[in-house]
Amino acid sequence: MISDLLNRLLAPAPEPLSQADARLALAALLVRVARSDGDYAAVEISRIDALLADRYDLLPGQAKTLRAQAEVLEAQAPDTVRFTRAIKDAVDHDDRLDVVEALWDIVLADGERDEDEDALMRLVAPMLGINDRDSNLARRRVEASR
């Protein structure tokens, strides 16, 4: 299943993903950001579970299962540039904007803005087709909600 999804994401002209595959790919991006500072903290893991449960109306066990699958996909996914561009080509813009906000939520989950996480966000948001202004607004919304 994971290798099939990666093959479809990395095809020369990826088709839009099914809802389940888009969920998994976007969850893997959350995991990638959480792991980017070398400290995949429990607070980030539980925030990913909560975001997935809320975003996709999942029960806690279902969210944990999705996150576990996303961890496997993230570990097998290619470099962030190709992975993110593939998601951009396969997922609607509005969903990508919501994902940038969720990514900021993960970056800020542990109360610290690590330079590796910031650098990854500066790379990922534009690759998802989200400009700096909208990314910064998403970050501010997350900060205001804390």
Image (tube, rainbow, N blue to C red):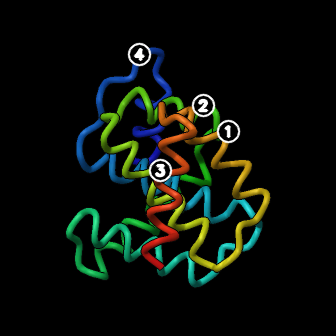
Front-most of 73 and 87? 87
Q: Amino acid at mark 2?
A: Arg
Above-or-below relation of 78 to 39: above
Assign a secondary structure to mark 1. loop
Which of pointers 3 and 1 indicates the residue nearer the eye?
3
Residue 28 bears which disc, if any? none
Query: Tags 1 and 2 in contact by the CB under 8 Å rule?
Result: yes
For the residues labelled 2 and 3, the Cα–Cα distance comes to: 17 Å
Dot 3: few (<14), some (14–19), or many (≥20) neighbours within 10 Å? many
Front-most of 58 and 97? 97
Earlier sequence position, callout 4 versus callout 2: 4
Q: Which residue is mark 2?
A: 82
Above-or-below relation of 74 to 124: below
At a point 51% along the width and 61% down the height, the residue shown is 140
Q: Which residue is mark 3?
A: 100
At a point 39% along the width and 23% down the height, the residue shown is 14
Above-or-below relation of 57 to 110: above
x, y percent for residue 46: 48, 81
